[in-house]
Image (spheres, helix red, strand yellow):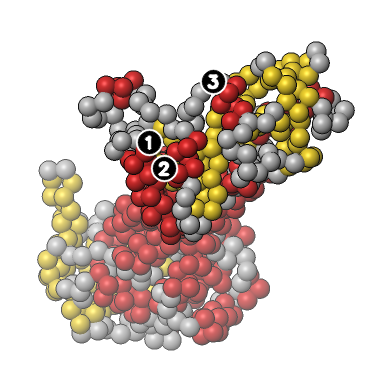
Amino acid sequence: MIRLENIQRVFQVGDQQVHALRDIDLSVAPGEYLSIMGPSGSGKSTLLNLLGLLDRPTSGRYLLQGRDVTTLNDDEQAQVRREHIGFVFQFFHLVPRLSAAQNIELPMVLAGLPPAERRQRTEQALAAMGLAERAEHRPDQLSGGQRQRVAIARATVMGPRLLLADEPTGNLDRAFGFDVVKILEDLNRDGITLLVVTHDPELGGRARRQLHMVDGGIVTDQRKD
Amino acid sequence: MRGSDTARYALAALAGYRSRTALMLLAMAIGVASVIVLTGLGEAARRYVSNEFASLGTNLVIVFPGRSETSGGNPNAMFGETTRDLTLDDMLAMARSSRIRRVAPLVVGEAEVSHGSLTRESPILGSTAPLLTIRHWEVAQGRFLPPGEVERGSPVAVLGIKVKQELFGNQPALGRFVRIGERRFRVIGVLASEGRSIGVDVEEIVIVPVATAMELFNTNNLFRILIEVRERAMIPAVIAHLQQTIRKRHQGEEDVTVITQDAVLATFDEILQALTLTVAGIAAISLGVAGILIMNVMLVAVAQRTTEIGLLKALGAPARQIVALFLAEAGLLSLLGALLGMAVGELGNQLIGHFYPALPMGAPLWAYVSAVGVALTTGLLFALLPARRAARLDPVQALARR
């Protein structure tokens, strides 16, 4: 699914070079449930952005489903994001002026799918998240848990094979957070590759494979049996 | 992304930020409306003048004494005078052409006109019967000057309606006598009210036979000769004929100026057209200002919506898609603003036309087309910078914020 070979990411801050990622080698098989933990500044978010094609490595190779995606141009990378990768953010990032249904529809609108198909898939996604009643509500009329469920529906409506979640429960209380984790794990059980970045050991500990990062490098790579 | 979806998304964004949208619509609308109203005014002035000329008849050729150019060895030319008068005999000689339908001489002066104890100063026009038809005037009471009395000056007068009112009030004037200068004239007609006709207020004049006027003002020189040509196409031939006649009669000197109604009209038309273009240009500046405003507000919009832009990128929108979305927003704004401005401008034109019915208001088609065109172009052009800034935005940083 994912192969990272000798990835480096260097930021220029003033006249100093900051190594956000150094010598990252990583393979992820399809359907894996992976958590990335580490203190803030350890490079875990940078790694996630890189995996999501929102950022480019300074050097190294990134193969996604056997394809070298580091050399793709902007249009091609956008297409890979559209069709293969879903994002779930800590702050949900719903568009405030759009209804729940419109937010879920957004990736399909960007992909240029026909309106009839969009409507059908949006309804399915809303029903699967138990939000059928909330379709026309705007984000500010939804609870935090409902917002994150809308965001997950939006991230998965295009049927991606890789789901990247950045502190998905970081902005929710325990009950709602657990709710969201269950949904993500159900998706993983159905075959999606799930990658969760968190500094919450309880959330990270649920994953079958756990990476610990310090100073831009992966220090441990544990598997639960 | 489909075009219709791009437009819908942009519209939703516009609806989402009402006050910003309203402000930009207003700026665009003011720009477009001012173009429409100002060109409407310029166009009205042009039409007003050409209507005035049309009322004089477009087949008209006017002859007056003196050369229009001041060069040449004639010392009198320096004082704008001519050596020879333009006489009634000259006029009769000129009239001998089958291409000419009517001829009327004109002698102009000022004199006191009185009836009983009432006196007023009035412009006196000396002419002949065809003048009525040539200038499209109408007689309200009685008749106009009798035909066929070019060289015989009979003491009769036709009064403008205002002169008649002031001297006779509501009493009948026909058949009564007025005194002009030292002589008595019988009133044979009263002109209908016709408003102004290029420089002369028809209501305030008194018309007498040309020979009488020449005696009255002690002159042999005609002020103007008005010649109505049978057909417009004959005008050049008639002009040649007139110049030849004058050369023959004035010992080879061509000491008259011949102008056509067309030439005068064309000159006025050009001047007023230039004026209209100038005011339109000034109004277009306000459109440019509106464009700059759009740029500012779009820059603020980009700053306000960084997370939204980052999200769109994460969801798979390439940079050019982001540019397209922001340009669609600016384009829609400009278009809506231009339509609003057109409505406001049209309304303004109607209002002005309502309060000043003499002005034939109405902006020309090119004003509408170019106002909308300039609005759209400036809107899109000035949105280009903010749109590209949005497209270059780093999604990682944008999404890190809440």
**Label 2 chain ID:** B
| B63 relative to A138, above or below | above
Quadrant placement of the C terminus of chain A: bottom left
| Residue in view at x 58 percent, y 23 percent | B215
Q: Nearer the viewer, residue B380 or B161?
A: B161
Res B259 label: 2
Residue B264 in the figure: left or right of residue B341? left
Neighbor class of circle 3 (other Cα within 10 Å; few <14, some 14-19, many 20+) is few
Which numbered disc, 3 or 2, marks the residue that appears first in the sequence? 3
Pointer 3 and pointer 2 on the same chain: yes
Disc 2 is placed on an element classified as strand
State the image coordinates of residue A6 (x, y, percent, origin top left): 12, 70
In the image, A164 versus A160, the foreground residue is A160
Q: Which residue is mark 1?
A: B256
Q: Residue at x 55, y 59 (%)?
A: A97
Query: Viewed as shown, does residue B401 lie left or right of B45?
Result: left
Amino acid identity at mark 1: Val
Residue type indicated by callout 3: Asn
Residue at the (66%, 17%) spot, across then down: B181
Q: Using the rendered image, report if marks 1 and 3 lie on a common chain.
A: yes
- Which residue is pictured at 54% across the width and 37% down the height? B105
In front of the other: label 2 or label 1?
1
Query: Looking at the picture, how far across and down is residue B6, in whole percent?
Result: 45, 69
Q: State the residue in front, A78 or B173.
A: B173
Please identify the residue farthest to the front as the structure is shown. B152
Side of B111 relative to B323 (left or right) = right
Task: Name the residue that disc number 3 marks.
Answer: B218
Q: Residues within 10 Å of mark 1 (few under 14, many from 20)?
A: many
Residue B347 marker: none
Q: Position of residue B305 (x, y in %)?
A: 43, 54
**Disc 3 secondary structure class:** loop
CA gap, disc 1 and disc 3: 21 Å
